[in-house]
């Protein structure tokens, strides 16, 4: 069975880096698929564990000139953050040194400014000494990445920067050391060390701001990891001891006191409490829990003390699974990104060709000094081109979008689902457990003549206590909630397909459907109107007879969730058609659909027919989302364009779905679609900016405006524009955090 693994990669800067690492990973035998994400700086690979191990992955990344951080994501995330802080600090030092030395060189060499500079700074040899550490120490990362890229016969953004700054540096060094050679061919021996040093300083400054901004896009993951408890109070051999999370085992008994975080997932064995599950559901109201209820790791115990048995630990806990899902979603590629990647793969070679054309054109037909014009414009073309912005346009928005979803209790499995969601125009809801609570409740008690409601409920519950029928449980529960003292039933007998009978307090009691009443010759004619009305409302009606006489009707129904009506309304306001699918008969289905405002009802659909119904609607040309929670919904969830599972549902349903609503709130379906629309709008804006920037400014850098307006783009300004373009794309994605989605 193939394994899917996500790990961090250090040293990526542009879309070409992504292509290079993906190519290197895919060359390894046994790796089925490899996706690298520039914004998250992570790679996700699917591979055969019999052929591939961590050392193969690490070597493949190293061969491309980058470093892989492999291991347990949960434990390595903090180390990785510390490493990133260290890198950011080192980058900051390089930026300060580069710009400081560049400023000194600029002061000593820029026309107009140089007259105010000390004589020592006007000395070209001093400028050479100041520029050399910037070129080969601060700029070493550009050379290292270029060498790795050339080994794989591709060029990346670092290649452009390395060539551009090296040309400026080498030319300047040449005219400084051998000025008479250039003067002999009629060219003034004037160096451009300021161009090389300030370009390196500004590009590194852009990367520094970009890294700071990108750190903001991954806040959702950091928040989730920060939710983990550090220790657990375990009871072993009758003694309590605080141990680290890594030592907790399945089956351990753990005590949790008020105000403490629940360390792992489990089931309460003793005690009761109110628990804040907002980290999972997004709901701020605490949930009451008692013996037998499940608790989720990282949620907060508010009031009581309780003991629970650990059922899931380590990477199996819900929090670990949420983190894994969010990381995989943030690391995945949206279809729209593939277009950007395709353009980026041809972009750098195209820029190199344009740079050569620029040099030749200016050298052959440019004004004097032709070599200087050719040199500066070529450097400007190499520096202005920015594949970074194109590489970051989609993944940064996806990161913020999926992170924002996770904060709202909406888990999005991958970027493709997030992209498709904004196109949805039909949503099919499964009825039981999705629109309804999935647990029948007593809704009506109608008594005949002078009978008492509580007395009728008490008799019915006393009789049903011995039954295993699902409807019996709802009647007994309702009686217990009303604190009714139940009597003992004798000679209890279940009559399949009809109901139950028994003796209570010496009287024969019969409780069941019409067929049972007819069999026992008990008249129900006076209540026929009430029975029909209740059945029209989609309720199951049971009749209670004592000593041969009808005394009450008790109606039971699977009640609609509180969020269902508003959830459906929100979708309809978005212009989305809403349908309901169920195995119930048409009358019951219509009754439930009417309550929540759904007009398209697919009733009497067997579990194995749900998938076919989804495909029928897709055949109408609709983009379909299916919302369900049960095992029988899994095929339909997988067949839909977007499958949405309720967090309260089965693992099978959640596995088959593209989006999981952990908060179980049906209003979140509309929220997920709004989030998709806003994320896609951000991506389009980013791509328009990234492509537009390059399309407009590369011709300007080539000097196309010079014949008309005598305007040329200084390479230093080109580097400012290039750095700004990347930062602006990331900043636009970060604005998505502030957008209201519910």
Image: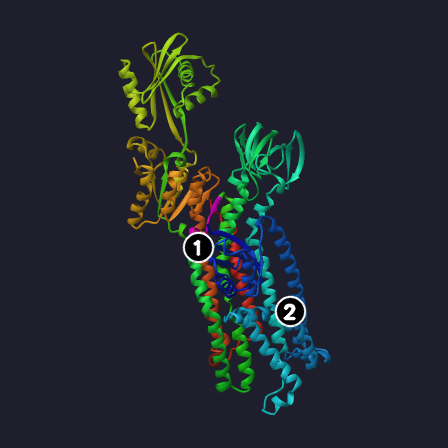
Question: Does residue 574 appear in the picture of this structure?
Answer: no
709 to 308, vertically: above or below: below
Alpha-carbon span between mark 2 and mark 1:
37 Å
Residue 326 location in percent, x, y? 51, 49
For this rendering, which residue is in front, 217 or 233? 233
Residue 259 location in percent, x, y? 63, 34
Label 2 sits on a secondary structure element that is helix
Q: Is residue 414 found inside the magenta-colored segment of the image? A: yes
| Circle 2 or circle 1, nearest the eye | 2
Residue at the top extreme, as displayed: 506
Residue 56 vs residue 334: left or right?
A: right
Please rate how many residues cluster around mark 2, counting C-alpha atoms within 10 Å: few if below 14, some from 14 to 19, many from 20: many
Residue 436 location in percent, x, y? 40, 33
Residue 316 location in percent, x, y? 53, 42
Q: Quadrant of residue 495?
A: top left
Question: Does residue 59 appear in the picture of this structure?
Answer: yes
Q: What segment is highlighted magenta in the picture?
A: 410-418
Tell me whether circle 2 and circle 1 mark residues in contact (CB < 8 Å).
no
For this rendering, which residue is in front, 434 or 62? 62
Q: Which mark is residue 680?
A: 1
Residue 632 vs residue 103: left or right?
A: left
Please rate how many residues cluster around mark 1, counting C-alpha atoms within 10 Å: few if below 14, some from 14 to 19, many from 20: many
Residue 538 vs residue 211: left or right?
A: left
For this rendering, which residue is in front, 431 or 202? 431
Residue at the bottom extreme, as displayed: 184
The residue identified by callout 2 is 138
704 to 693, vertically: above or below: below
Label total for image? 2
For this rendering, which residue is in front, 83 or 447? 83
Label 1 sits on a secondary structure element that is helix
360 to 701, vertically: above or below: below
Residue 8 vs residue 335: left or right?
A: right
């Amino acid at each position: 069975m193939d394994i899917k693994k996500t790990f961090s990669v250090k040293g990526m800067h542009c879309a070409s880096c992504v292509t290079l690492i993906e190519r290197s990973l895919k060359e390894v035998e046994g790796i089925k698929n490899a996706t690298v994400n520039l914004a998250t700086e992570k790679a996700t690979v699917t591979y055969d564990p019999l052929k591939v191990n961590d050392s193969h992955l690490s070597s493949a990344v190293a061969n491309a000139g980058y470093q892989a951080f492999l291991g347990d994501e949960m434990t390595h995330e903090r180390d990785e953050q510390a490493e990133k802080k260290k890198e950011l600090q080192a980058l900051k030092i390089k930026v300060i040194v580069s710009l400081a030395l560049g400023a000194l060189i600029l002061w000593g060499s820029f026309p107009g400014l140089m007259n105010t500079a000390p004589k020592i700074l006007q000395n070209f040899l001093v400028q050479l000494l100041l520029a050399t550490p910037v070129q080969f120490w601060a700029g070493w990362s550009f050379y290292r990445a270029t060498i790795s890229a050339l080994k794989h016969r591709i060029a990346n953004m670092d290649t452009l920067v390395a060539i551009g700054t090296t040309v400026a540096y080498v030319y300047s060094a040449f005219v400084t050391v051998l000025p008479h050679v250039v003067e002999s061919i009629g060219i003034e021996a004037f160096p451009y060390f300021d161009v090389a040093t300030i370009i390196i300083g500004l590009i590194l400054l852009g990367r520094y701001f970009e890294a700071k901004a990108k750190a903001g896009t991954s806040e959702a993951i950091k928040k989730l990891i920060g939710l983990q408890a550090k220790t657990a109070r375990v009871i072993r051999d009758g003694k309590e001891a605080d141990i680290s999370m890594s030592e907790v085992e399945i089956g351990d008994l753990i005590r949790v006191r008020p105000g403490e975080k629940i360390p792992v997932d489990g089931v309460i064995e003793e005690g009761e409490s109110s628990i804040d599950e907002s980290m999972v559901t997004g709901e701020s109201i605490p949930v009451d829990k008692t013996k037998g209820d499940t608790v989720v790791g990282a949620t907060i115990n508010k009031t009581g003390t309780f003991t629970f048995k650990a059922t899931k630990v380590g990477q199996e806990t819900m929090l670990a699974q949420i983190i894994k899902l969010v990381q995989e979603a943030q690391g995945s590629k949206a279809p729209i990104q593939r277009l950007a990647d395709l353009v980026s793969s041809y972009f750098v070679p195209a820029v190199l060709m344009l740079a050569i054309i620029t040099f030749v054109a200016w050298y052959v037909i440019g004004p004097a000094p032709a070599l200087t014009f050719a040199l500066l414009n070529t450097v400007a073309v190499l520096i202005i081109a920015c594949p970074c912005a194109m590489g970051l346009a989609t993944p940064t928005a996806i990161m913020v979008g999926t992170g924002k979803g996770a904060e709202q209790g909406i888990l999005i499995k991958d970027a493709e689902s997030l992209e498709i969601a904004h196109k949805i125009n039909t949503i099919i809801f499964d009825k039981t457990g999705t629109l309804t609570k999935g647990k029948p409740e007593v809704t009506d008690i109608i008594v005949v003549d002078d009978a008492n409601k509580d007395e009728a409920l008490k008799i019915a519950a006393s009789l049903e206590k011995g039954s295993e029928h699902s409807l019996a449980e709802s009647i007994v529960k309702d009686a217990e909630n009303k604190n009714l003292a139940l009597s003992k039933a004798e000679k209890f007998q279940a009559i399949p397909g009809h109901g139950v009978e028994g003796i209570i307090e010496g009287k024969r009691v019969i409780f069941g459907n019409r067929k049972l009443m007819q069999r026992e010759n008990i008249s129900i004619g006076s209540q026929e109107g009430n029975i029909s009305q209740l059945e029209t409302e989609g309720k199951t009606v049971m009749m209670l007879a004592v000593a041969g006489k009808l005394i009450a009707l008790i109606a039971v129904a699977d009640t609609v969730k509180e969020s269902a009506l508003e959830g459906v309304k929100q979708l309809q306001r978005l212009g989305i058609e809403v349908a309901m699918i169920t195995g119930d008969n048409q009358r019951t289905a219509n009754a439930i659909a009417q309550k929540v405002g759904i007009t398209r009802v697919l009733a009497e659909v067997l579990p194995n027919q749900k998938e076919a119904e989804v495909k029928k609607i897709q055949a109408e040309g609709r983009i379909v989302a299916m919302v369900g929670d049960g095992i029988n919904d899994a095929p339909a969830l997988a067949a839909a364009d977007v499958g949405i599972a309720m967090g309260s549902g089965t693992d099978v349903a959640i596995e088959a779905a593209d989006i999981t609503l952990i908060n179980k709130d049906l209003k979140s379906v509309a929220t997920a679609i709004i989030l998709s629309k806003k994320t896609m709008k951000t991506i389009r804006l980013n791509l328009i900016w990234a492509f537009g920037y390059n399309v407009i400014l590369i011709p300007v850098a080539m000097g196309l405006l010079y014949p008309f307006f005598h305007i040329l783009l200084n390479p230093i300004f080109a580097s400012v524009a290039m750095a700004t373009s990347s930062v602006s794309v990331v900043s636009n994605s970060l604005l998505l955090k502030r957008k209201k989605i519910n």
